[in-house]
Amino acid sequence: MALFRRPVRSRPIQFFLISMFAVPLVSLVALWIFAASITVSSAISNQNYNATTRSINAGIQALAIGLPQERAETYLWLVTDKKSPETSLLATRKVVDRETPAARAALQPQLAQLSASPRQALSTLLTDLGQIGQIRAAIDAGTMGPSAAFQAYTAIIDDQFLYFDASIQDKSAELADVSIGAVDGDYSLEMASREVALVDGVLIDRGVMSPPVRQLFVASATSRQLLLNAAVATLTPSLRIAYTSFDNSPLSQQFGAMESQLLASTDSGPIPVNPRSWQSVSTGYLAGLQAALTRDGNLLASQSASLTDRLMTEAILVGGVGLAAVAGSVFLLVWFGRKVKGDLGRLHGSVRGMAEERLPRVVQRLRQGDDVDVAAESPAPATSTIREVSQIAESFGTVQEAAVAAAVDQAGLRKGVNQVFLNISMRNQSLLHRQLALMDSMERRTSEPEALADLFRLDHLTTRMRRHAEGLIILSGATPGRGWRDPVPVVDVLRAAIAEVEDYVRVDVVSESRDLVIGSAVSDVIHLVAELIENATVFSPPNTRIEVKADRVGTGMVVEIEDRGLGLTAEERADINRRLASSPEFDLANSEQLGLFVVGRLAARHGIKVALRESMYGGTTAILLLPFGVIVREEDAGLHEPAPNGERGQPVVSELPALGLAGRHRLLPPAPGTAPSLPAASAPWGPEAMTPWPQAFQPSPPSEELPLLPPSSPGSNHLGMPIRVPQANLAPQLRASDRQAQQAAAREAPQAGARPPEATRDMLILMQQGWQRGRVDDLDDPEGAPGNGAE
């Protein structure tokens, strides 16, 4: 059972870098947010607390002083049964009435900012401030006694300090404990003022302290001591100094002693204090304690402002430094990511450049036969300051150098193989040329039709062998020696191609074109078409015909070679068309497709387009598009006048009239029992160019004996047809040795009464065509032909 593996999903390196740095970066951001939130919130809380405290103190300070004073004056006025002057009391009431709205305005906005407990305390305080008028009315109406009036004002003041404590705890300021200690100090001053008011009232009223008053006095004295001790305990050492110094002063000691005496006294007798001493000590004590509280309040305000500034500075520093750290981390992440990506990108570009540009360029140069310097064509990839990336670059550099060296070695091997091809094909071609020369000599010495037909078959096979040898030369990158200087008619080129195919009798040429093929391309076009025709004959049933059509189109000449074989699949046809279009390098592993590589190489050499398509008969149609430049138009043929026949060993074929029916050129199959004819590019195929029937069957007189002409001899023709000149297409440097072979063959040729092989061939061709016309047209024997009684 096959194992299924999940496909690997590749992601950019930035994804991994971001994933790698995401957790620490998020943690850093979270820590920064946490530290900044704490510091900033603390700074903002202290800032708001200080602002609120200053606002409340400014609005309630006068009321906080006036309300205890109104309480004391009201209490003393009631103790004297309203007989003492009330001028001071009325003035104090006016002050309280004037400051109450301001206090309300300072306290009212705090309702929306406080939590439930301090908000309830503030609501109670605001309600108490609204009842001052009712308290005064009861006092003035005589329905409220001294103790009740005292407790009514005391309740308002107690609610005020209760709100102060609750609001301080709700704000959670940095100096909350110190602020509560300061409030306790103020509250102890309030308790001391209560004691003084109660004792002053007792001294006015016969010096005897009633039980209710004593109870209030004991509570006030006890609370004063507790609050003062709590304030000293919670205050900072700098703030505690004022309290401790005042508490140790003689005035505070005297007040404490008198307070102790009052607490120790009984209810029945007068209080054990001297009124004048009490007045002096109590007044001094309240003033001294007020001064100490004022000093500590100013110092506390200064410390709170300094602390707020410090907290704001810390908040700014924490926020700024943290933000800078986060920004720096992000910058380093981006910078490092871009650096790694840039280094890898440059390495990737260098590797792709090697794979897509340098190595193909090296291979192309090697194909062209250029020498390649491995070191120069293998530049080291871009390095990096990152060790791992640099090591990868070095590894790729090694791979690149090895690839270039392998390409050079492969090119050397391919060049050696091509050289082997070239040497073998050149040797074969030399042997084939010698064989053709020998066959020419034998044809000249033979007069029997059967022997001459066999020699023609050998000539045909040798021609095919020469084409295969030329195929090896083409694959090796060289150019075959055969060539034409002047244009050759397309029809003759096609016939010459058919002549190089073994089963040529099955091939028909159908064309009305009088265009020509430029001389430099004739040999390659013959070879190209012959390969395609041979492929069509091999892969189609032997009883079917192969039809070759040629006609001019807008961009050149189209040649169609159609067979009626089994055809190809769409995939096979597409693969072959792709190879034909790209002219692939010859692959030794695909030697069975040798002709495909030859066709592709020849087509690429002259810009000829070759493609296969499905035939209407089920086989395959090969389509060739020979562009203008390879094709010479009929109307432009005058610009390419043929050279004298045989000049420089280049055969010349003249434009010929049409053959067959309907003006179509057609190669007809040979009659049964007759020798097949050999169409060739050097043989004209028109009836006007043929020898007349009576002359074709007459032996050549001795005077018409033609010597074997050297390649440079002009006028090498007989009866209007060119004579084949052996070895005429060899390179000049090979002609000297071949000329000796030609001369030897000429010496061996019969010198009298022998018919030239060309004349015999023409005679056989005429015989074949006559038989075919007889079968097709059902005509009588032509006048003067053999068999009609003519001698």
Image (cartoon, grey):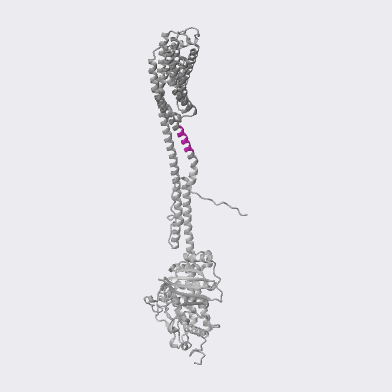
Of residue 259 and residue 738, the one placed in the foreground of this image is 259
Residue extending farthest to the top is 269
- Locate the N terminus by quadrant: bottom right
Say if 222 sits above or below 163 in the image.
above
Q: Is residue 116 left or right of residue 634?
A: right
The quarter of the picture where residue 688 lies is bottom left
Q: Is residue 567 visible?
A: yes
Q: Is residue 35 magenta?
A: yes
Q: Is residue 591 magenta?
A: no
Q: Name the spot of residue 583 as percent of width and height, x first.
A: 47, 65
Magenta segment, principal secondary structure?
helix
Of residue 145 and residue 742, the one placed in the foreground of this image is 145
The quarter of the picture where residue 738 lies is bottom left
Question: Which residues fall within the magenta stretch?
Answer: 27-38
Q: Residue sitting at 44 percent across and 68 percent down?
A: 605
Q: Is residue 302 visible?
A: no
Q: Name the spot of residue 37 as percent of width and height, x first.
A: 46, 34
